[in-house]
Amino acid sequence: MRSYFLRRLLLVPITLFGVTILVFFITRIVPGGPLERALAEMQTAGLERGDAAAGMALSQEQMQQLAELYGFDKPWYAAYFSWLGDLLRGSLGNSFIYNEPVWTVMAWKLPVSLYFGLLTLIITYAVCIPLGIIKAIKHRTTLDNVSSIVIFAGYAIPSYVFGSILILIFAAQLEWFPLLGGFVGEDFHELGFSARRST
């Protein structure tokens, strides 16, 4: 038992190292990375200003500056260890989407994530524990078989597909919820305190 535990413990740093390598290369290789996003934003900003050369390619000097900014001017191993050092120091850098520090973006999103996470946890156990008890009592009955089929179908359907179906039914057809994204409605700031609590 002790040797098994030690072997598993020794796999932890190897696994973490593999995860950091994977994340690093995904952010550098996949299309739409930080360099491509920065180029697109610069060209979009130029078009909005009405610059004649906005749609043209950037100069070599500008490309070099962007590469230095995002660490693409270094060999992959040097860039990786620089990125890993920042990560170990707790510096996550800036978000490529929001142009804000990652910690700030996480602080914005954390309350909403905690809210939905706790709500999901409560609903899951409120449904699953009674359902498990009922299935144990009514083993091999119609209720047990039908609920098993529904559960397996729920696991088989990808969450994004099921979410799209729910949006289609409850937002588009029944109009119980707004189709627009966001945690609160557009008129949230115009509502009084009691109305806000009820939304």
Image: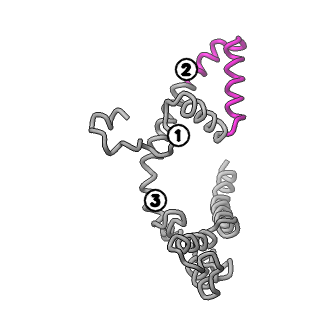
Are dots 1 and 2 in contact, CB under 8 Å?
Answer: no
Where residue 7 sits: x, y (%)?
69, 56
How many angstroms separate mark 1 from mark 2 (CA)? 33 Å
- Residue 55 placement (x, y as % from top left): 63, 75
How far apart marks 3 and 1 lie (CA) works out to: 24 Å
Q: Which residue is tagged 2? A: 130
Q: Nearer the viewer, mark 1 or mark 2?
A: 1
| Residues drawn in magenta | 129-158
Report how far apart the C-alphas of labels 3 and 2 lie in the structure.
Answer: 38 Å
- The colour style of the image is one colour
Disc number for residue 105: 3
Circle 3: residue type: Val
First-in-chain label (3 vs 1)? 3
Q: Badge 1, how many Cα within 10 Å: few under 14, some, many 20+?
A: few
State the residue position of label 1.
179
Dominant secondary-structure state across the stretch colored magenta: helix
The percent position of residue 50, horizontal first and vertical second, equals 53, 74
What type is the residue that disc 2 sits on? Pro
Whether residue 56 appears in magenta in the rendering, the answer is: no
Q: Residue at x 69, y 34 (%)?
A: 155
Q: Tell me the kind of residue under disc 1.
A: Leu
* Front tag of 3 and 1: 1
Q: Earlier in the sequence, mark 3 or mark 2?
A: 3
Q: Callout 1: helix, strand or loop?
A: loop
The spot of residue 161 in percent (x, y) is 67, 39
Q: Is residue 5 left or right of residue 99?
A: right
